[in-house]
Image: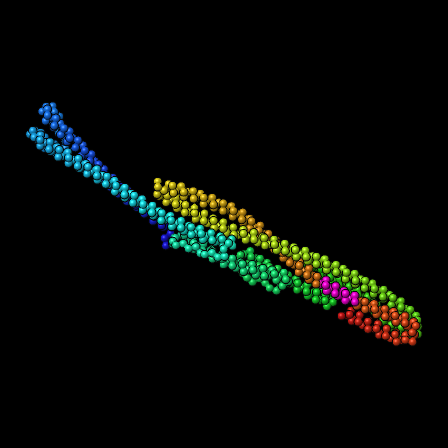
Amino acid sequence: MKSIRTKNMLLGIGIFIAFIILQIVVAMKFQLLNTNVTEMQKDNDLSKKLYEVYVYELKYKQTHSKEDLNILKNKIRLLPTKYLRPILMKVDNGDFNSLENFLELNIASLNKKTSAIKIDVTYENIVMFIIILIINIVINIALYLFSKQIIENIETLKGGLKNFFKYLNREIKDVEEIKVKTYDEFKDMSDMINNNIEKIKSDIKKDIETVEEIRLFSNKMASGDFSKLITKTPANPEIAELKKTLNHFVKDIKKTFDAILEILDEYKNEDYSRRLELNAKGEIKHLIDGVNALGKALEIGAIKIANSLTEKSNTLKNTSKTLSENIDSLANALATTSKNVDIVSEKTNDITDNIKNTVDKINKMKIISDETKSNALKGEELAVNTLKAMEEIADSTREIQEAITIIDSIAFQTNILSLNAAVEAATAGEAGKGFAVVAGEVRNLANKSASAAKKIKDLVNKTEVKASEGIEISDNMKNNFLGVVEKINTTSDYVNDITNGANLEAKKIEEINNSIKEIHEMTEESKTIMQNTYVVTYDLSQLSTELYEEVNKANNG
């Protein structure tokens, strides 16, 4: 597997070697060109000198002037040795026709050679141009293929990250892995991103399962079922802490309710001596105080009723005994009995009135309890809506934070790529200046993106802290309202039980009143039916004895 840095280095080395070869070829061609040009210039100079000799030879041939002959010889002496001797020999011998032919042949030969050199120079220039063109084409093709591969990989990563963001925003249900065809840093980046995507998908699945269990758990708590605990293990530490808090809350509430139910069972069995001693705050403490106050009130009421019944039964027993022992003084005894019966009736009526007042107050307590329950349910609904809103804000904040982290990573990678591009542009020399400017702008843009991402990340972190505080407060408020609703339900049940018990006691008192009325009627009848006094007295004695035993039994029980 070749990394982008290795490929980049190999491409730079290839371009460097191509330029070295190009410089060597150009240098060789220039050297050959200089040699040909120098030789052509020499041939041109020689051709000009031969032409001047040819012109002066024709002139001398016409004038036969000694001056022209001397000028001709001076021109001949300027020629190279190769041409000097043959021409001077021909001039000295006066063979000017042969000299003309010699000069014409050599001038034509030199002109032909110069033309050939010019053709060679033109050919060499064309060849050199073609070589430079081919090398430039190869370099541009290599740069194009290299940049095309990088762009394709960047587009692949861009598409994969775009789908991943859609998955995080719940726009799509699943995200495919990023597939990069090359084996380089882009492959490493795609593998790293794919591994993180799989981990995030797994964590999200765990969190969703835990949240669903929490939802079912909340529904059970709302219906009064505290027997189950949350068992799923989430990946999110905040959800894990929420799970731990809810389980601890349920355990504490269940413990409190068990203690309350236990002591209420004792109250139901007419044992009002125990009181709740639990460390609690808020509405739970108010409920415990209410139960303790209820027990105390029931205990005081039971004592009063027992003392009153004991007193009245003792009075009735003593009266009955007096009637049995003093049958002869029946008139006086009947008067005393009538008086005592009136007193008992008055006291019993007072007890009946007190019990009716107690029932009325209990009914008012029930109405107040129902209104409190309605308000608590509304408060619970508001707390649940607030908690949901805060959780959605926290989830959105975490998703934004993850997206900013990825953007920061992309900006960092873009910065590295722009630095590599700037190095390559610098290696390319003049041809890479434009690419270097673009690379610098890309690097500046990456730095600005990283700076902006950092500022946004700081703001998001602050938002996340505030959202977590809001979630905790809303959750505590919802839990308190749930506790209030449960305690109000329990208190309402107890109020109903007390109401039923009070009505039953009222019926018993009414029965006692009826009995007292019967005694009073019997006393009145005894005034006129003396012969039945003994029988009535005996029956009254039996009735008072049974009542006394029942009262003692109730007090001892």
Position above or below: 473 against 27: below
Residue 26 pos. (x, y %): 26, 41
Residue located 47% across and 57% down the image: 198
Can you say whether 239 is above or below 317 in the image? Answer: above
**Residue 87 position within the rendered picture, expressed as x and y whole percent measured from the top left:** 10, 31
Image height of 547 relative to 181, above or below: below
The answer to whether residue 255 is visible is: yes
Residue name at image x 29 percent, y 43 percent: 132
Instruction: Point out the stretch of residues depicted in magenta.
Output: 494-507
Q: Does the rendering let one see residue 36?
A: no
**Left or right: 517 as drawn, with respect to 398:** right
Q: Could you say which quadrant of the image residue 298 lies in?
A: bottom right
Magenta segment includes 496: yes
Asked whether 302 or 504 is in front, the reply is 504
Quarter of the figure with residue 320: bottom right
The residue drawn where x is 13% and y is 33% is: 104
